[in-house]
Amino acid sequence: MAEHSWLSDEQRGAWVAFLGAHTLVERALERYLHQQAGVSHAEYEILFRLREAPGHRMRMGRLASVLFSPGSRLNYRITRLAGLGLVRREQHPTDRRGLYAVLTEEGVTFIDRITPGYRKAVRDTVLAALGDEEFAELGRLTGKIFAYLKEPDGGAQERG
Amino acid sequence: MAEHSWLSDEQRGAWVAFLGAHTLVERALERYLHQQAGVSHAEYEILFRLREAPGHRMRMGRLASVLFSPGSRLNYRITRLAGLGLVRREQHPTDRRGLYAVLTEEGVTFIDRITPGYRKAVRDTVLAALGDEEFAELGRLTGKIFAYLKEPDGGAQERG
């Protein structure tokens, strides 16, 4: 279209592969989680982050920040997970802005039950296509992109 | 959690990097497209596929297939793009199942205008983080994942 292009044909191919691979990996994992656990991939990630957090709890703002999720969308998902009995909201007794998401006991049991299968599904999709060394290289390359695009205040927010 | 895990800690890190990089790349491009063109990334991809297709038209089923998009979601997006005057639907005169999406003249002008900026945005996000050779390697690795996960009948559908 433009006479001078910002991407060569080869680079366009790499870009399409990157997007396409993510779409198919995401689809495979959504399908697995939907069938085996009745939750979406985004919901799985929320539960997993809470499982790893001290006291199985995180401030809502921090959770939104580490998941790079708009607050409104996170709120919606927390409401659904609360309806399933896996998460509850807690208000900090004195800090008015201190709204937390907390994994319930049922939530802990749930995420511990599905995580091994989730990891096997990752293995069956990505590690079945790539060898161990290639997967490590994919991690290194995407890690560089992640570090580059992460906003300067992202780290500060995460510690908050 | 499980004593034997399906992913090592290093592999989990690679997986998180892959997902995180995609999230941030997608966010940067959504922001760019929203601000510069008022369309989403998914809408951009529909317009671009139609731009490249013979006669700027594709059967709806085939478009859904190459975009790996559920038909209902594609329908919703086509309705929005039609409302913007960029796409129209066309019924095949004899084949009842032959519903096509067609780029309008305005749609051609639109996609030609925004594509150079889109490609520059890809360059500014991914190619600013990776060198040319690393980007090519990322394309090779994700191409392997894409080829592995693509359903066996995907190719046949695309030719349909």
Image (spheres, coloured by chain):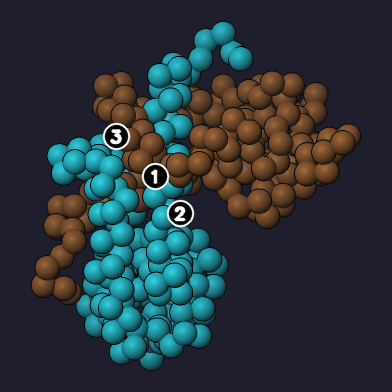
Chain colours: A cyan, B brown
Q: Residue at x 31, y 89 (%)?
A: A105
User: Chain ID for label 1?
Assistant: B
How dense is the environment of label 2, judged by Cα within 10 Å: few (below 14), some, or many (20 and up)? some
Residue depicted at x 45% and y 24%: A12
| Vertical relation: A132 (above or below) B107 | below
Callouts 2 and 1 on one subunit: no
Evaluate whether residue B36 shows in this view: no
Instruction: Give x and y (percent) for residue A36.
Output: 39, 72
The answer to whether residue B93 is above or below residue B2 is: above
Residue carrying label 2: A27
Q: Mark 1 vs mark 3: give the one in front.
A: 1
Q: List the residue tagged with mark 3.
A: B141
| Viewer-nearest of discs 2 and 1 | 1
Residue under pointer 1: B149
How far apart marks 1 and 3 lie (CA) works out to 13 Å
Specify the amino acid type for callout 1.
Leu
